[in-house]
Amino acid sequence: MLARSSRRYLTRHPWLTALSLVGVALGVAVVVAVDLANASATRAFRLSSETLTGRATHAVVGGPGGVPGDLYARLAVDLGVTAAPVVEGYARAEADSSRVLQILGIDAFAESDFRPFVAPQGDSGVDLPALLTTPGGALISAGTAADLGVAAGDTLGLRVDGRPERAVVLGVLVPAAAQAR
């Protein structure tokens, strides 16, 4: 009886039936699209975070006074912990004063375990001796270099805490994903 009544209603109102089915399908499509967008954004954030921070599992963060210098030696020598110190700060590019750049100071010899773009054997194309011996020597990401119009060998004007500084661009870092293409 219920089936006969339903069939009669559905045959008398085919447009309502079709619109109901389209509405359900559209609702499912929206839920799936939102879920895919969330998953994609989460993955992109994780990948960009790993690119910046490397494969580190822990971080020792200093307060206003920083971290005592002997802590790194104690961790690496006494405890055998693989560690890589990082000094972090921010600067404004003189070419684009609205652009704030994150500056990372790293130990190139300790970093190869954490950041794939630093390879002591020269696999990364980075001239480590020049990076260690050039005052103000810096590496810059390919995207930032393109935005600021600089290339390897150029000098980049910066403002750090209101003081003018110069960085010599020794290399341009290309993300591993872009190199694979």
Image (spheres, rainbow, N blue to C red):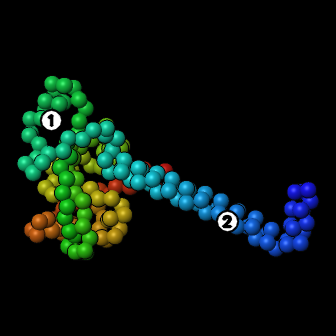
Mark found first going from the N terminus, 2 or 1: 2
Q: Which of the two residues, 106 or 6, is positioned nearer the viewer here?
A: 6
Image marks 2 and 1: residues in contact by CB distance under 8 Å: no
The residue carrying mark 1 is: 72
Front disc: 2 or 1: 2
- Tell me what residue is drawn at x 32 percent, y 64 percent: 144
- Tell me what residue is drawn at x 16 percent, y 54 percent: 134
Q: Position of residue 38 (x, y in %)?
A: 50, 56
Few, some or many C-alpha atoms within 10 Å of disc 1 (few <14, some 14-19, many ≥20)? some
Label 2 to label 1, Cα distance in Å? Answer: 57 Å
Q: Position of residue 103 (x, y in %)?
A: 22, 57
Q: Position of residue 91 (x, y in %)?
A: 19, 64
The residue carrying mark 2 is: 26
Q: Amino acid at mark 2?
A: Leu
In the displayed structure, would residue 49 be above or below residue 5? Answer: above
Within the image, what quadrant is residue 173 found in? bottom left
- Tell me what residue is drawn at x 14 percent, y 65 percent: 160
